[in-house]
Image (cartoon, grey):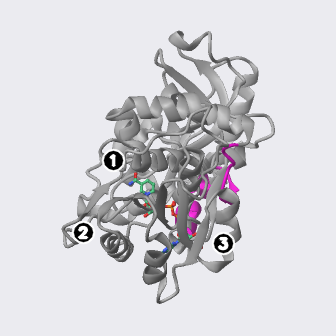
Amino acid sequence: MQILHWLSWAGYQLDAGVFNHQEASQHVLASAKTESSSNIQPRNYAAFLPSEDAQIAVAETPFPKCGAEELIVKNHVVAVNPVDWKIQDAGHSGRFNLTYPIVLGQDLAGEVVEVGSSLQDEFQAGQRVMAHASGLGNGNAYGAFQLYTVVKVATASLIPDEISFSEAAVLPLSISTAAAGLFMKSTLGLRYPTTESSHARASGNSPTLLLWGGSSSVGGSVIQLASAAGYTVITTASSAHFEYCKELGAAHVLDYHDSDVVSALIALLKGKDVVGAYDAIGSDETVHQCATILHALGGGTIASVGAAPDDLPADVAVTRISSGNIFALEPEIGKAVWVEYVPWALNSGGLVPNPKALVVGKGLENVQKGLDRQKQGVSARKVEVVLA
Ligand SMILES: NC(=O)c1ccc[n+]([C@@H]2O[C@H](COP(=O)([O-])OP(=O)(O)OC[C@H]3O[C@@H](n4cnc5c(N)ncnc54)[C@H](OP(=O)(O)O)[C@@H]3O)[C@@H](O)[C@H]2O)c1
């Protein structure tokens, strides 16, 4: 067996033929366990994308360093998002402008093993947390697809004992993405939920949000955060997920497969105080569907997770969502949501982990399988890999 060190990854392609991922991963888990029990810094291993046109590989990587406002987390479960396979699929297109090798992954849940110097009064080793891993902007030590990740405390929340690591790992990126589209001044600028406002579920007269894609992972968090902030949510999903969306807080759910779904939504929303549209699917088609509806209601803004076409009616604006902006551009939103609301809401039941997990395997060698499975398409499920 040959274990490649991070620093030698530049030469990875030369060694790739003799590298056995499965063998390496077993070695990882065994050595990390032995060494942590004798209080020696554990060895870290990562599932990484070696280059633009490669499959995910596994190799040893340095144990991360913990900054003053950071935590090091031993990952128990990581979740896979569409962006992970989209980066792999982008190949040499330059669409994501990344430096390789790269450790992907934005959702993790695990156990704190090291606490930054400024956080000694707030956190301690052994606590259970979930976090929005921020590897894409900050470097490989911050990516989720490794045994130990360093996370910025502003992107992390304690998880109550009743919530498993697998349940918690479905949430983080979807929370940040929902918050970025709903609450930022540059998106829909809605009021955010607080520990006082939650459970004051929206009534018939509440301002109303149109959400396209309520059964998606992002959509589930949009429903929960928007309704906890006092908005009525009207959304679309397959009929199989009507009840699911309603349990999360949606007032009405319409089937996006129906040919008259746009006119039905216009009829339903007419006369209501519509605060805008959140497109949690973000295709050209869904943005146009949202735009047709808003235009019929007198105009408005669409926050889109993806496409932002420029051929919309003049009274409809579209703004693109970037989940990391709640930390980088409007950190007061990141703090209000992640530090103040999420830990409280998880404890009080105001925020419930959804969708359900779809575990594809245990060990880093299953990360590629996870990307492949997410890419096939999921229906109200979150693909996960168990690591510990
Ligand atoms: N910009 C950002 O910062 C950011 C962050 C995160 C995600 N994203 C993007 O957001 C999108 C959603 O991500 P995700 O993880 O939430 O996706 P996901 O959970 O994998 O989406 C699957 C769901 O989409 C629903 N769906 C598919 N086509 C639909 C349509 N035409 N109308 C309504 N619902 C539809 C399906 O509903 P049914 O099963 O009910 O049919 C299914 O449950 C992806 O494109 C992702 O790349 C962007």
Task: Residue 139: give x, y in percent of width and height.
Answer: 38, 36
Q: Which residue is mark 2?
A: 309
Query: Can you tell which of label 1 and label 2 is closer to the viewer?
Result: 2
**Front position in the image: 190 or 13:** 190
Q: Residue at x 46, y 45 (%)?
A: 179
Mark 2, Cα crowd under 10 Å, few <14 / some 14-19 / many 20+, is: some
Q: Nearer the viewer, residue 309 or 167?
A: 309
Question: Can you say which quadrant of the picture contains the C terminus?
Answer: top right
User: Is label 1 in a helix, a strand or a loop?
Assistant: loop
Vertical side of 372 occupied by 162: above or below: above
Decide if residue 345 is on the left or right side of residue 302.
right
**Circle 3 sits in a helix, a strand or a loop, which is it?**
helix
Query: Residue tagged by mark 1?
Result: 100
Residue bearing the label numbered 3: 241
Distance between the alpha carbons at the discs numbered 3 and 2: 28 Å
- Magenta-highlighted residues: 350-373
Q: Is the C-beta of the residue carrying label 3 under 8 Å from the nearest atom of ligand 1?
A: yes
Q: Residue 178 or 115: which is nearer the viewer?
A: 178
Q: First in sequence, mark 1 or 2: give its number.
A: 1
| Tag 3–tag 2 contact (CB < 8 Å) | no
Tell me residue 44's x, y (percent).
Answer: 57, 34
Q: Earlier in the sequence, mark 3 or mark 2?
A: 3
In this view, the mark in front (3 or 1): 3
Find out if the beta carbon at label 1 lies less than 8 Å from the nearest ligand 1 atom.
no
Residues at marks 3 and 1, CA–CA distance in whole angstroms: 39 Å
Q: Indicate which disc, 3 or 1, sits on the residue closer to the N terminus.
A: 1
Question: Which quarter of the figure has residue 159?
Answer: top right
Disc 2 residue type (three-letter)? Pro
